[in-house]
Amino acid sequence: MHGEADDRGERPVTVDLLADLQAGLLDDSTAARLRRRARTEPDVKATLAALERARRDVSALGVDPASAPEVPAHVTASIDAALRTASRSTRRRWPWRRRKSRPD
């Protein structure tokens, strides 16, 4: 799964790339290529299945509102600004990722 491009010129499939697929962060063309590879490459299929199991396990834990104090507004605003900056940087480095619009 890792390493150099294969003889078809395909990029290596990493866990990060599969997590991006699962999260819906990839453009349609890249997502379709990865889904095809998941159908034909057992190690890619197994990794994607493991990510799905991990997502389900974490989701099943639920949320405990008492587990952490409320985050101050200035902290969340600072985090949002940093993420927007990082997102712009990511688009320049990895143009195959698409930005999803966020509901306001």
Image (cartoon, rainbow, N blue to C red):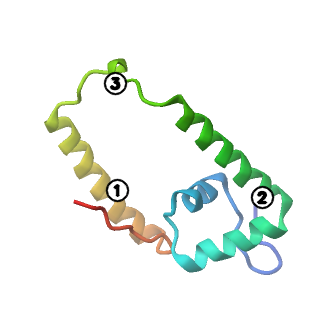
Residue at image position (64%, 40%) is 54
Mark 1 sits on what residue?
86
Give the distance between the C-alpha atoms of the residues marked 2 and 3, in whole angstroms.
35 Å
Camera-side residue of 79 and 60: 60
Camera-side residue of 93 and 97: 97
Q: Secondary structure at mark 1?
A: helix
Query: Nearer the viewer's eye, disc 1 or disc 2?
Result: 2
Whether pointer 1 and pointer 2 mark residues with C-beta atoms closer than 8 Å, the reply is no
Whether pointer 2 and pointer 3 mark residues with C-beta atoms closer than 8 Å, the reply is no
* Side of 103 relative to 40 (left or right): left
* Side of 55 relative to 93 (left or right): right
Mark 2 sits on what residue?
45
Give the distance between the C-alpha atoms of the residues marked 3 and 1, in whole angstroms.
28 Å
Mark 3 sits on what residue?
65
Q: Secondary structure at mark 3?
A: helix
Amino acid type, mark 3: Pro
> In terms of image quadrants, where is residue 58?
top right
Q: Is residue 21 above or below residue 8?
A: above
Decide: few, some or many residues near mark 3? Use Cα within 10 Å; few <14, some 14-19, many ≥20.
few
Q: Earlier in the sequence, mark 2 or mark 3?
A: 2
Camera-side residue of 81 and 36: 36
Amino acid type, mark 2: Lys
Q: Position of residue 81 (x, y in %)?
A: 22, 51
Q: Earlier in the sequence, mark 3 or mark 1?
A: 3
Decide: few, some or many residues near mark 2? Use Cα within 10 Å; few <14, some 14-19, many ≥20.
some
Which residue reaches farthest left?
A: 74
Residue at image position (69%, 69%) is 35
